[in-house]
Image (cartoon, rainbow, N blue to C red):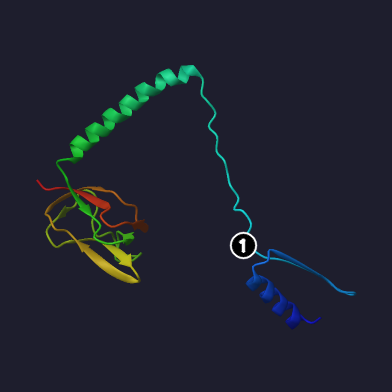
Amino acid sequence: MDIKEIQSLIKFVAKSGASEVKLEMKDIKITIRTGAVGSAPETTYVQQIPMASAPMVAAPVAVETAAAEATENSDDDSKYITIKSPIIGTFYRKPSPDKPSFVEVGATIGKGDVLCVIEAMKLFNDIESEVSGKIIKVLVDDSSPVEFDQPLFLVDPS
């Protein structure tokens, strides 16, 4: 049996859907295992271990504190305008790796100023500001994927 016959046998087994084929001849022994189309997928179970009662008493206090901080942040953020992504793609703060960022936190922007670039399907789209103001926060890391309508910047319009 030569290599071409073995290759054609492998292709035949893969197309047939068999998970394993063993072939024994007088001078050769071949076992072919495929990705097992019919095999069950591996399942991982995660089980939480119950905690002692003492930490449970402290947990509600931490949750209340976190909720209060989130409320304070949302109150602070409510006076700002959120600039959102108009498309799905990869967010870039710079026009190229060796150039400075389009905008930094604290920068004053005007309508039509380019804030970032979003790459979608090998096309680089300039994202321009629709408001004037001051950049308060950049909400996305450079070179990270963004979704449609995902917040990118917080702008103080005053």
**What x and y, as percent, mark residue 148?**
28, 57
Task: Identify which residue is drawn at 23% across, 66% down.
Answer: 126
Residue 125, by quadrant, is bottom left
Q: In this view, does 59 lie above or below 91?
A: above
Does 39 sit left or right of 84 as displayed? Answer: right
Q: Which of 47 and 155 is in front in this view?
A: 47
Three-letter amino acid code of the residue under disc 1:
Val
Residue 93, by quadrant, is bottom left
- Mark 1, Cα crowd under 10 Å, few <14 / some 14-19 / many 20+, is few
Does 14 sit left or right of 107 as displayed? Answer: right
Q: Mark 1 points at which residue?
A: 37
Task: Identify which residue is drawn at 70% across, 74% down.
Answer: 10
Does 9 sit left or right of 72 as displayed? Answer: right
**What x and y, as percent, mark residue 38?**
62, 60
**What x and y, as percent, mark residue 44?**
58, 44
Task: Identify which residue is drawn at 73% across, 82% down.
Answer: 4
Residue 114, by quadrant, is bottom left
**What x and y, as percent, mark residue 8?**
70, 79
Q: For numbered disc 1, what is the local secondary structure? A: loop
Q: Nearer the viewer, residue 103 or 120?
A: 120
Task: Identify which residue is drawn at 53% across, 32% down.
Answer: 48
Q: Which residue lies furthest to the right in this view?
A: 26
Q: Is residue 3 above or below residue 118?
A: below
The N terminus lies in quadrant: bottom right
